[in-house]
Structures are given as C-alpha cells and as structure tokens.
Image: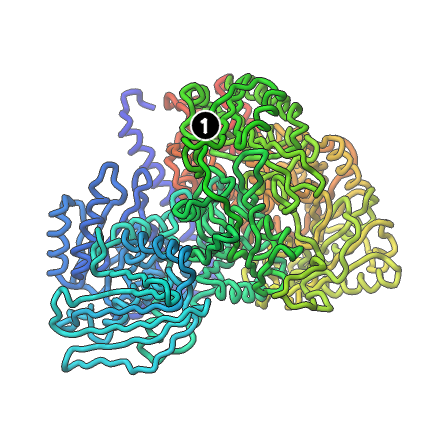
Amino acid sequence: MDQSESHEERKQRIKRKRDAQRAEKDARKRAKKARADARRGIDRSLNPPAPPPLTPLSISPTPQTTSPTPTPFGIPTVALLGCGSWFSLKHHQPYLAKLHTKTPPSIRLTSTFSRSPSSIAKSSKVLAHNNVPTTALQTFTSSPFPPPSFFHSAQIVIVTLPFTNNCAEDAIKKIMNLYPNIKIIVEKPAPPLPPPLSTNIAVLENWIAKPSFAKFKKNLSLHIMDHGRPTSYKFTLTQSAPQNDDDGWRELRYCVHDVGVHAVRIIRDLFGEVSEVTNDSTFICDEANRTVEAGGNLIHENKLAGTTLFQFRPNLSKSENVAKLTISFESSSPDLEYDVTNAEGDSWIGGGVSAALSAAITFVTNSNSTKNSSLGRRLCYEEGRRDVMIVEKLVSGGGVVDVVNMVQKLPREQSPSYSNTTSTNAKRYDFVVRCGGVEDVKRSVAKIRRFAPNGLFPTQVEIVGGENMMQEGEGGGRIRLEIPTLNRLIDFNADASTVTIQSGTTLRTLVSLLAEKNYGLPSLPILLDQTIGGCIATGSHGSGLKLGTISDQVVSAQIVLFETGECVRLTMKDELLKLARCSLGRLGVVVEVTLQVTSLKKFAKTEVIVSSAKEIDAVSKAHEHCWVHWVGDRGFAICLDEAEEGSAYSGRNWYPFSAQLEKEMDGRNVVRNGSGGRNWTMQYSVKLSMLEELLQVIKRVEKTFSDKYNTSPPFELKFLRSSDRTIHAPNSSDEEDTEGWVALNVWWECFEEDLLELKREMEGLSESRVHHGKYHNMAAPMMPTTMPTTMPTTMPTTMPTTMPTTMPTTMPTTTPTISVILPVYNALPYLALAVQDILKQEVGGGLELVLSDDGSTDGSFEWILELCEEMKRAGRDFEVVEVDDGGGEENPSKLLETREGADIKADVDKGAPCVEKVTAKDVANSIARNAKLIFVRQKVRANRGQGKTQTRCLQFCRGKYMGFMEADDERDEGNYAELVELLELREGEIDAACCKVRCIGWDREGMERYAAWQNSLLSNSNMRAARFLEIPSLMQATILRREVLLSCLVEEAFMDSEMWSIDYHFWLTFFKKGFRVEKLEEGGKFSWRQHPGQQTRNHGRLSIENMRKCKCQVLAEMARGCGEGSDGRIIVYSVGVTLTGWVEDLVAEGLEVEAREWRGNLEGGETEDRMRLFAFGMEKMRNKILCEVGTGWREELDLFVS
C-alpha cells in the first residue's frame, strides 16, 4: 500500500475493488442464467410481458423489498404519510419535532407526503416553527401513493389518512406488501387489515394515556376497596358535528367511529372486555340537519352492564361539548364521575398524545421488556380493532362481539422477534395470541389446543404479562400468549384482609393501592414492575427468615387450565392450588388471584458487618428482614426492623445503601476483561444449615474470578422461611421442615461461561433449588401426569376416560439412560441398518429410540409399521403415538429436495457398495433387552422438515442423555455405552461427549479429509476454537445431557428453514452458552454414509453461503457485546470474493465492518477492542497467520472463520 495514501483514498480504493468484484460476480450469474435459458429454449428478449398498471393505492403483484437504511446510534427514522389533518398539524407534528430536535434526538424525521400541496406547505410551516429545518426533510406530493424514495430512509411510517373510503386501509396494505420491514403507526380508528400483523403496527390511542385517566383509574380502584364493585355505568358524549365532510376526515356518518373508539377504549380499560352489545334504538344520521345519534348497552364478560350515548349537533358552544363517564355503586354509595372534557391538568382533545406517540414508537421498534411499557403493549393493532368492532355494533343494531385475530399463524421470517432482559437472541414464535379478558384466554387456549404442535402445552406456550422475566421461557415458546390488559383490581375484603386482583397488575400498582388503605404485603421483591402473575409463577420474594414468597400469600386463584381448557377457581381446599402457587406457567394461565395482606408496617434500617457463616446466621435470625451483600472478605447485612419512626414498607426500604457499601460495590458487578458480556442474574437456594458450605462456594468462585480478572464480584444472600404451600418455589419444603433457606443471588455483567462457574458449584450443593425466574440451564419441572384427588368444585368432577391422541397411551415407570431421536424421510434402503444399530446397543439403565416419519414416499413409513408388527410378535417393547400437528402439503418447502429415481440408481450402480440386506424381522430379533422403540406417527402425513420432525420426537423423549441419528448412517456396537460412561465419569466437567467419525459408502474419499480434521479435535478448547471454521463434531456422533440440549433449544436450534443449517446453529448455540464437550480418543465410531441422495450433497442450506450467514448471526452478537452499548465494529482479513462475502453478510447483521485484504501482515494500525476475523479455509494459511500475529493473538476477539 502507498504510505502516502490517505484513509479516505484507501476507503475509496477498497470500495472500487469491491464494486468490481460484485459486478464480476453479477456477470457470472447472468451468464449462468443465460446458459440455463438456452438449454430450456427460453428467450427472455422476445416480447417480455408488460407490468400490470398500478391504480391509486392498489397493491403491486411484484413486491419490492427495499429495507430501511439504519441511522447512526440506532435512532429510529420516521416518515409521515398524510400530514395535512388538523390533528396531525396541531398535536402529532409539534411533538415529533420535539423528539427530532432534542439532545440527543429520539427520532429523525426523514420525509413527509400528502396528496395536497397545501397540506405539505402547512406541515413544513409547523415543523419549521418547531425548529425542524426544511432542508432536513424530503417532501412528496401530487401522487396517489409515495414513490419508493419516500420509504428508503424510513424505519417507521406514521399513517394519518382518513378511515373513510378505505384510504388508510389501502395505503397500509400496500406498505405491508411492498415494504414488509417498515413499521407502521396509524391513527384511530384502526382499519381492517389481514394477518400476520405481529408487532409491526401500532394504533395511536391517547385517551388511556391521559394523565387524568391514570389518576381516575386509581381513584376507581380505591373506591372499589371502600364500596365494592360497580353496579352500572353511563357514558355520554355530546359534541359539535362537522360543518362539512372536510375532505373525508370527518364524514358525518363516521363521527361515532371517530370519537367512539376512544370512549370504548377507556370503558374496556376500566371494566374489562365487552362480550355483547344490545341496541334498541336506531342509528340516526341526518345529513340535512347535520345531526348524528347512536348508543346502546355494553355487557362485559364479568356481567357488568353500562349504557352509552353519542350525540353530534351543529353549532354547539364550547361549554356544550361534553364527554362524561358516571359509575354507580350500591344505593348507599356515591357515584364516581370522570369528566373527560374538563379534567384537571389535561387537554380534552390532545391529552395523552405525546405519551401515546412515544409508546407507539418504542412498541414497533423495540419489544425488549426493559424499554417497552404497559401502555405500548396496549397500543397493538388487535386492541385498536376491538374498539372499532364494538363501535360498529353500536351503530348497526348490536350483537355478540367476536374476537379479532386471536391466533395468528406467522411465517418464521415475518413473525415478531421478542427479547427479554437477559436474552441475546430475539425469539420468534409460530403463533402470537393477544387476549383482552378472561373469556379471550379461554377461547385462546381452546384454539391453541387445536393448533399447538403435539398438544403438549407446557413446552410450547409462553405466557407474557409484563415481560420482566430474567430467564428465557422454557422450551422455546412456540406460542406466545399475551395478557397485557388483565390489570384491574377486583375486590378488597378488609375483614378477611384479602385483595383480589387480575394477574397482569404490577406489584407497583398493588403496593400503591394497598398503601392508600394502610395495608401491604408482608414481603416484596425489589423489582416492583413485575406482574402479580409473574411473581406467583416464579416464586418471587423479598428477604427474611420469618417471611416466604409472594406465592405463599395466595389464598385462591382463578386459572384457565391447559389440561381441560376450563376456567376454575382454586381455593385452600383444592390440592391443585399448591401447584398453581408456583406453576412456572405450566399448569395454565392464571388470570386472577386473591392475596393475604397485612396492616402496613414501618421499618427502620441498620447495617451490620459480618465475616463468617456463624455471624450471618445470627444476624438473619435476629431481624425481620435481612439482606447480605458479600464483597471481598466480608459481608454487609442490611437489616429492617419494625419502628414507629421508620418508613412504610414498600420493598425498596433497603435503599439507599450506606456510603461504605456503595464504595465497596462500585464497579464490582462488571466481571470481565475487554468488550462483550451482558447482564445476568441467577439464584440458587440451599437449606440454612448449609450456610458454611455456601460461603466456601463464594470464596472459591471469588478466587477464580480474582485470578482471571483481578477482581472479585459481589454476592447477595437472601433468606426465606420454609413453606409447604408450594412445590417449585425457591423455599418449597416438606410439612415438617422449619429450618429456612438461604438464597445466593448474583447480578453481574459477564460472559456466560463465567456465570457457569458459579452454576456448577451451586448444583454441587445438596438439595440446591434454582429460581426459575432467573438464569438457569435446567428444564422446568414437569407437571404431574395425574391430577390431584381433590378437585376444585368449579371443575368437572369426572375426567376423560381416555388419554388424548396426542399423548402416549401408557406412561413410563422408569426413566431410560439415553433417548435417541431419528427423523426419517425417504431413507430406504439404509433405514433398517440405522434402526438396528441403535436398538442393539446395550446401555445400562436402558435406551429408547424415538423416531418419526416425515412424509416419506419411498416405503420408509410402511417399513416402520412392519417393524412394529414384528416387535409385537417378538414380544419387544414398543409404543406408537399419534400426533396431530395440523394439515400440510407434501414437501412444502422443498426441505429435502434430492435428485430423483433413475439419477440416483445410476450413480449407485456405478460405484456404491452393496448395502447389507436387513429385514424388519432381523431388527426385531436383535434388539437389546432394555431397549424400546417409540414411533411418533403423524395423524396427517406431510413433509414438514427435519427440524419440526426432531422437535416432534423430542416431546416424547425421557432419557437423562440425548442423542441423534440419521436414517442413512451406522454406528459401532457399544458406542453409546462408551459415550455415557465418559459423561458420567466427567460429571460436572463436561456437558456433551462425542466420538470419532468414519466415512462409508459411495465416493467417501471426497469427505475423508473433512472427517480426519474433525477427528483431530479432541478437547473442548480445540473444538471451541474451530467452531467458526466448520462443524467441530457431527450431531449424530454426540450425546448431551438432557438439560443442556433443552437449554440450547431455547434459541431455536431446531429452527426449520429452507436455508438454515440446523446442526451448525445448534453447535454455535452450545458454545455460546459456555457448555463443554470432549471427544473419545479411542473406542467405537460413528459411520457417516456418503451417497448421492444425502442432504450434505444436495441441500442448499449446507452451502458455503448459508453456513456463513449462520456464523455471522452469532458473530454479530459477540461483536456488539449482545447489544449492551458496544458499537459492533469488526475487522475482516481475507482475499477476493471470500472477503467480499464475509463483509456483505456481516454488514447485513448491522455491524460496522472494515475489510482488510491480507498481504502477509496486520496492516491497519491499532484495533483497540475490536474483533478481528481471519477468513481462510486452508490450515497452512492459518498457521502462517498465527506466526505473524504471535503473542498478539487475543482469545474470543481474534477468530479464524471459513
């Protein structure tokens, strides 16, 4: 490189070279396509079909896929489609301008569009008046729909078009079709749109965001606590009718829609879902006199009934415009009134607009729970459509209100991604279900029972309330069930000291309401934004040996059971309540709970320094609340004791810490060197008698971190009373236990592998219990297979006499040592050998083979049925389970596309060795004595892909260890026993064991060098270092601990996509989570068959390009530090098209990438903490680079990729 070349010149030179490489690549593609066309006799130059004409606001049949250009620092870019309405000019645009001009800016306005030049002029004037320079915006006008350039720089489009004449509806449908990545915010009323909608659309609802409404809602709850539940309500609205149709915005006949949707929303928010509308009067729209009238009775699912009346009259004065809600109680109780038009400190028209806009922008751009609000989730499209449906019933004569979009089936690539506080990978769901009330939940569970894969709800449904969970949902959460509006106080009983509240209510709201009446909960966690349902599901708690968890305070619960779909109320006499108090979301959807409360106490705080287990034990027993922070070689015990001069208990009385403790804690929770890492919280509890052993664990982990990072992290010790009221809570114990528990809790910023050091230590302690609401790698405990003998009175007294067809017909009495999953698709003639090699393996404790046919057309399915018949005759253990995972066409995604019939036979005849002939009878007679076959049979046979087939089998696996097999491979006898022995010998040290691989079959020489490379990787460190080069071990040559496999599956390791490498993504997930693997140096091997029809040779998802995309996704997370503020910069060294490919794929992941062509040295200067990738496939080249870098090589920051 010319030393005088400037940085900018160098960038331009690299860009020109990259452009030339792209052009060359495109030319090769065009030439290849031309050759293919020539072979097929296609001449694309002859009369190409003209594109169909586009009518105004129609949908183009050929969607464009322009993606929005990201802005620096993640600032959302916003475009306005329709900017001339008076409401947008007066309320939306001034606030958006404020967000644009603040420091730092919250959004960046990019462009405005209107069909009218006068509207553009008005908008530009308003924005300029609010300090948005006109030069910062592009303006578009005079066309029915914005041109593509309007959308190029926009991530969010705010649509402010008339509800009438389908204007808004047509525009949004066109955006969804042409620009599927664009997020949309639409003004009310919400237009009808086709699913899937996901989180891409929010509907602006400002009335529930009004400060006066929040205050009134709290007053209503306090009124209910004093006077009981409401008996009725009346909402009356009288407003001036528009003088003309105002260009479609306020057409007279749509006046009720325009305002009624806001009124209906606050009614639903206060009283729950509306199930029916009755209307005895006729909708009146008098065009001549400019008057409109509509109204009717709303009947809620809780049987409360109210009346509504909407009147629009011409030329009303300001004082005659009224919107008022009056709520009635028992005759002796005063009415409660909310005057929307004259609420103190609020604007009748524009109140809440700024809060709604901010929440909507956050909702559509970021579903992370730490940044999203309850208000944002209530602005989803489904909520807006519910309001419109109720208004339409009011103007059309009434009727039953149907549920909108209750279950959306979402394509994987379009489904919404969600992440929680500790999630590195946003999760995607097959279904998203949003529920407005209890009846919605019941209907949704009923639909889920029909849609859910295999019908096994505990591993398939993730219930979402406040999204504050510190651990990703169990089992991957293929179905997301949201209950954002179940947040009302139902009842308060001062005599019994109980409060009944819906499960979506936050602790903060409940604590505030109880404090107003001088009541409280005896113990609270410090995080008050959790919902009641989430607290109970995970056993959240405060700290004190005299106190339990919030789950222990539950005296009754209303729950929609997954088992039956029924909504039941469980009381103290029902055995099931013990399970429901901390069910981890596996029993059903808790919709309402009754909690025991106490009189509000005041506490004073003291701080004691402790240095031994004996001192900690004494302090914890002497004080009502005690929380110890162990830092270095001592602990700081914060103690709370009842005192008249103290502060009312709120769960936050521990703060502020003393100056000494603040100084000790400062910066210690960051436990890492260099960039990367993320926030984790984890908790394990042990019996109080094991306090000394727990302290030794702390000291050992402290030493490990001190040696590694020259710092020691803080540890929290919390204390809990033992409880026999729960099963899965951190303090669950037998009835006779009175000892109490101590919980070790951490909140660190670190790498996951460092957190696993503590995890391994804690799991080595006797009877340690994990807090399932925080980080862990354990599968949540399964619910009992039989229901308790004492059933709630509201549940049917008789249970079904037959098990559902989606469940095994017999339940196992023992747990096998290993479960092996075998997906089958067109596997003849190799299938018999593969099945025999598994079932003849002798493994102490037993082996089960769980196989499923994925719609084979070559006779594989019939062979499996024949095998079952032969096993029946031979008296062997087998089971056939039929599952209904929906209909489906054959091979819908071409997931297993191979060359057909004659082509394969010709290749086999040329060079494939003969396959040993093994019959079904031979297999049945060679099965080991403690081996079992489970055949998972589809009710509707279809090819759904390898990932879904493996997941289908997984539901029926019970083994301690898990393995996989392909239907065309073989393995040596005794191989599984050797792998199990290695895992058991290295308990606590490794999480998976694998064996070496040999290639067999046709053309095996082509893969033997690859197999030799895999076989050379024996240690965990070698396999981890090679993980971005190639798959370090075949999945089929590996067995894993069950909990490790399930932990990796949380992040879609079995994601099915036509172009997604299932096995490779699994291994990247495995190493990302810090798990360890070791390979057998000697012993049996796995035989990897090479043949013309195998996926390795035929499937596109195993191409270099698609494997690279899989790697780039994980590399992007590492480079960004998992989104915790690092800038995500990365340097790539390589040459030619390899360099270009890596740069393009990393840029597609949102990284800032610097490309450096390798010239034998590390040119480019300092790299600071930036990651460096060396993209070279040849080992000889990699060795040269290692010599060049020498001692400057940085683990986890410098990586070889291929």
The relative height of residue 921 versus residue 312 in the rendered view (above or below) is: above
Residue in the foreground of this view, choosing between 53 and 887: 887
- Type of amino acid under label 1: Lys
Residue in the foreground of this view, choosing between 824 and 1094: 824
Residue in the foreground of this view, choosing between 807 and 468: 468
Q: Secondary structure at mark 1?
A: strand
The relative height of residue 91 versus residue 767 in the rendered view (above or below) is: below
Task: Say which quarter of the image contains residue 572.
Answer: bottom right
The relative height of residue 741 versus residue 660 in the rendered view (above or below) is: below
- The percent position of residue 348, horizontal first and vertical second, equals 21, 58
Q: Is residue 1134 left or right of residue 51?
A: right
- The percent position of residue 844, horizontal first and vertical second, equals 83, 42
For mark 1, does the 10 Å Cα neighbourhood hold few (<14), some (14 to 19), or many (20 or more) residues?
A: some
Q: Is residue 12 left or right of residue 719?
A: left
Q: Quadrant of the N terminus?
A: top left
Does residue 692 appear in the picture of this structure?
Answer: yes
Residue beneath the point at 40% across and 28% down: 656
Residue in the foreground of this view, choosing between 131 and 796: 796
- The percent position of residue 85, horizontal first and vertical second, equals 18, 61
Residue beneath the point at 34% across and 36% down: 17
Query: Which residue is label 1 attached to?
Result: 605
| Residue extending furthest toward the front | 332
Task: Say which quarter of the image contains residue 49.
Answer: bottom left
- The percent position of residue 1075, horizontal first and vertical second, equals 61, 34
Task: Say which quarter of the image contains residue 743.
Answer: top right
The relative height of residue 1113 versus residue 232 in the rendered view (above or below) is: above
